[in-house]
Image (spheres, rainbow, N blue to C red):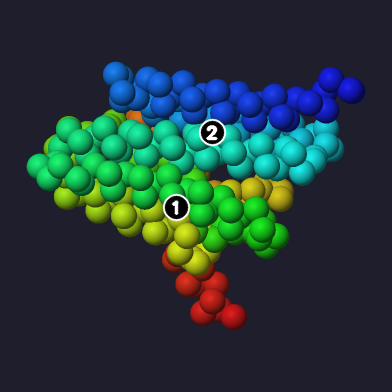
């Protein structure tokens, strides 16, 4: 058990390593950045799961988790967008706008660390979701990709989604307290849509899945407010 209590931090460290490797690779192989983000998300899920199963937690583990997320879901997507903006922009300064992703990711993670009320919902887009959306743009169908990969559209995506990370909008937390339909209708609906998109678009479905997550969360929140 003495060794097992260090398993969550080891998994968090694996998340951090994926982020570092992704940053190294992005300058020569931008597509690989998405794979490292996927791997980082996997380890990010596992470290929390392991901590709950083993019933171990610590202030160090919480801080390490945020630092790893900053690298994998803040700096890595920022560097990916930097490369794309540099390649697709006419103005020489535009690609520096990608730094917004890292900056607002840091703000998002800092806000999350001091907010104890984000269990049933998230306030602002989580950094992993933002990183998944950005790095997976490269997998969009060619007809859509040609429209997205222009300097103006990429910069717009950068600005909008950076701001959405710190905007006080409530988004659904995908944590199932049980596996019954009652109480989980919105979560199951989102999963059905996600699986359907993945079947038809494969990796290119990820940006659409993130967008559907935002839309479903907003609609669900609006309907819930009206019921009250």
Alpha carbon distance from label 2 to label 1: 19 Å
Residue sitting at x 84%, y 38% = 55
Relative image position of residue 159 (x, y in whole percent): 31, 55
Relative image position of residue 22 (x, y in whole percent): 43, 24
Relative image position of residue 186 (x, y in whole percent): 53, 56
Q: Nearer the viewer, mark 2 or mark 1?
A: 1
| Residue denoted by label 2 | 41
Drawn side of residue 145 relative to residue 52, left or right = left
The image quarter in which residue 50 lies: top right
Drawn side of residue 180 relative to residue 148, left or right = right
Relative image position of residue 150 (x, y in whole percent): 15, 42
| Residue denoted by label 1 | 104
Compared with 107, 86 (above or below) is: above
Asked if residue 56 can be seen in this view, the reply is: yes
Secondary structure at numbered mark 1: helix
Residue sitting at x 83%, y 32% = 54
Secondary structure at numbered mark 2: helix
């Amino acid at each position: 058990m003495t060794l097992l209590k260090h398993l969550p931090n080891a998994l968090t460290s694996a998340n951090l390593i994926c982020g570092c490797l992704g940053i190294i690779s992005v300058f020569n192989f931008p597509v690989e950045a998405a794979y490292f983000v996927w791997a980082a998300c996997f380890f990010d899920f596992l470290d929390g799961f392991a901590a709950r199963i083993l019933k171990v937690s610590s202030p160090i583990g919480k801080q390490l988790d945020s630092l790893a997320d900053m690298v994998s879901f803040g700096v890595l997507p920022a560097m990916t967008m930097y490369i794309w903006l540099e390649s697709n922009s006419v103005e020489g300064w535009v690609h520096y706008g990608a730094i917004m992703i890292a900056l607002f990711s840091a703000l998002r993670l800092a806000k999350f660390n001091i907010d104890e009320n984000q269990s049933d919902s998230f306030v602002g887009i989580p950094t992993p979701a933002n990183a998944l959306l950005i790095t997976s743009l490269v997998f969009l169908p060619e007809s859509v990709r040609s429209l997205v990969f222009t300097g103006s559209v990429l910069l717009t995506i950068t600005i909008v989604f950076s701001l959405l990370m710190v905007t006080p909008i409530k988004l659904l937390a995908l944590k199932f307290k049980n596996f019954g339909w009652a109480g989980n209708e919105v979560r199951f609906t989102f999963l059905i849509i996600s699986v359907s998109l993945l079947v038809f678009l494969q990796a290119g479905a990820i940006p659409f899945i993130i967008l559907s997550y935002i839309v479903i969360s907003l609609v669900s929140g609006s309907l819930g407010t009206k019921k009250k």
